């Protein structure tokens, strides 16, 4: 196995944590159930048929599955060409891939994505999300950070 594929372990860990946490919430809470944890955080059980933050609810399930497949294949191709020193990029892409696959498994298994993290202040609630969504968001942030650092070093021309 090519040494760059060691990064896939991060994708696998992300995927496993995502699926275990969703199974746990599905077994613990009824649909629309809520359990207060802290004054600003609830565990909830929501079923999201859309994309990030419930956007594109009317889009066909196959579109999400196809997009995640294309993204994952692109990441695998990139990993095959990965150079040393691109750690933020590798971690970011592997988090994105693990999260994308985790949400695709939900779509195939359930027809929706299980969301359960609910942060709020007063009556304002941030959109509920899950481990896969968090991994995708952190992965995207790492890619942006890596691009900004590369630009600062002079590697990317504005």
Image (cartoon, grey):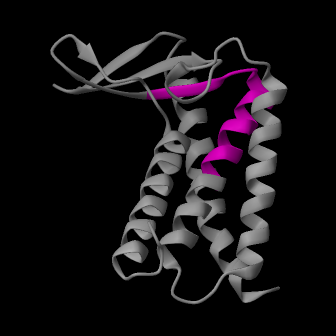
Residue 112 location, quadrant: top right
Which residue shows up at 73% across the image and 51% down it?
Answer: 71
Residue range in magenta is 98-116
- As for residue 74 lying within the magenta part, the answer is no
**In the rendering, at what x and y percent does residue 50 appear?**
63, 20
Residue 111 location, quadrant: top right
Query: Horizontal placement of 93 versus 130: left or right?
Result: right
Query: Horizontal placement of 1 versus 36: left or right?
Result: right
Quarter of the figure with the N terminus: bottom right
Query: Horizontal placement of 47 versus 29: left or right?
Result: right
Quarter of the figure with the C terminus: bottom left
**In the rendering, at what x and y percent does residue 142 appear?**
44, 62
Which residue shows up at 48% across the image and 9% down it?
Answer: 32
**In the rendering, at what x and y percent does residue 41 appear?**
26, 28
Which residue shows up at 61% across the image and 63% down it?
Answer: 94
- As for residue 109 lying within the magenta part, the answer is yes
Q: Is residue 149 above or below residue 94?
A: below
Residue 82 location, quadrant: bottom right
**In the rendering, at what x and y percent does residue 5 appear?**
72, 78
């Amino acid at each position: 196995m090519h040494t760059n594929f060691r990064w896939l372990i991060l994708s696998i860990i992300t995927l496993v944590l995502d699926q275990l946490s969703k199974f746990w919430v599905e077994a613990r809470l009824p649909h629309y159930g809520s359990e207060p944890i802290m004054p600003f955080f609830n565990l909830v059980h929501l079923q999201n048929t859309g994309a990030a933050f419930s956007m594109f609810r009317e889009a066909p399930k196959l579109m999400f599955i196809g997009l995640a497949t294309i993204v994952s294949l692109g990441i695998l191709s990139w990993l095959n060409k990965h150079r040393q020193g691109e750690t933020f990029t590798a971690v970011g892409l592997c988090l994105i891939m693990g999260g994308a696959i985790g949400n695709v498994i939900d779509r195939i298994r359930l027809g929706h994505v299980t969301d359960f993290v609910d942060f709020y202040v007063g009556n304002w609630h941030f959109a509920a999300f899950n481990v896969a969504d968090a991994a995708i968001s952190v992965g995207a942030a790492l890619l942006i950070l890596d691009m900004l650092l590369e630009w600062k070093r002079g590697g990317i021309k504005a």
